[in-house]
Image (cartoon, rainbow, N blue to C red):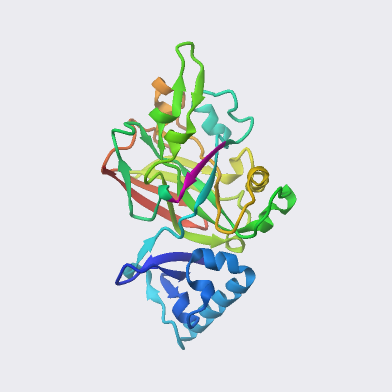
Amino acid sequence: MKFVTYTHGGTREKLGLMDGLDVIDLHQASGGADCFIDMVALITSGDEGLARAQNCLDVAENGTVGRPIPLAGIRLQAPMRPSTILCSGSNYSEHNAEKAASPLSGREPEFFIKTADCVVGPEEPIIYDEKLSTKLDCETELAVVIGKPGRHIAVEDALNHVFGYTIVNDVTARDRQVRRSPEGFTWYELGRGKAFDSSAPLGPAIATSDEVGDPQALALSTRINGELRQASSTSAMIWSCAELIHFFSINFTLKPGMVIITGTPAGTSWSVDKELGGTWTPSAGLIAATRYCLPGDIIESEIEKIGLLRTVVVAG
């Protein structure tokens, strides 16, 4: 199943279940069940909530109650706004190879955090604020949505803690992130470079773990103004989703609704920025960036079995 948060003829956000090109209002179809108040309530409800969602789908398809709404007639919002987004950088060897190496690149996950303040939804703007950055970059990443709580989670049990998966565009201020000494030493300031307004577009839907299947076998791509910049597979991750769940659960008790983002492959604008150590030559079919993102640019982040997340850069 795929779940969305949307508005329809107003500003109140509703929880929906996608049914082809339609959306079912779960709160209405269930007669007001508490587990359908919002996405976190659904995630927290576990298997019971999923069973009730399936029942709503069956009832709606029978035409008895909860008539589906055409997807074209609603406005999708971010599926949820997680308070904590645990982020793993440098998790694709091809991305590590396109840029100047830091001492830990590829040796352990780069650990940084984004918050709900960073989140925007489909079609919402990415803010270009030149007082913050003139090197605004975009990265498509698979996002893991935690469903069951746990601490010190074993790798072999980790995927049992997953509710589903969505897409995150890890928007980055490269000139805040990448620091280089006159001697050529490179280090990363992942706070100011990664966490700021509109730096985590998220959506368009959360696909449940059974809908996705193996999270290490998903095609991933990024198009900017129609140009294919990134194309890879989650099979190319250095640390799998299960390994990242284990890694982050050493620091935090993972809770329902927390999100882990898993890194990006080659093809970022950073990859061709020699000033910041970019060294990449694109493979067949990919188009190298000629600049960083600017107002008017259209970003399309797509991951197999989940969907396409579209956002536009606007002047702040």
User: How far across and down, in percent of the image, does residue 217 sit?
Assistant: 60, 50
Looking at this view, is 77 or 236 the one in front? 77
Q: Is residue 85 magenta?
A: no
Region in magenta: 111-116
In depth, the one of 59 and 283 nearer the eye is: 59
Tell me residue 215's x, y (percent): 60, 52
Name the spot of residue 64 as percent of width and height, x first: 46, 88
Q: Position of residue 138 (x, y in %)?
A: 41, 40
**Quadrant of the frame with the C terminus:** top left
- View extreme (top): residue: 183
Q: Which image quadrant is residue 134 in?
A: top left
Viewport quadrant of the N terminus = bottom right
Looking at the image, residue 232 lies above or below residue 26: above
Q: In this view, does 238 lie to the left or right of 141?
A: right
Tell me if residue 287 can be seen: yes
Q: Is residue 278 visible?
A: no
Question: Which is nearer the eye, 81 or 214?
Answer: 81
* Magenta-colored segment: predominant secondary structure: strand
The answer to whether residue 114 is above or below residue 136 is below
Q: Is residue 148 above or below residue 59?
A: above
Residue at x-position 41% and y-position 27%: 272
Q: At 64% from the left edge and 43% from the top edge, which residue is drawn?
A: 251
Left or right of residue 283, residue 292 in this image: left
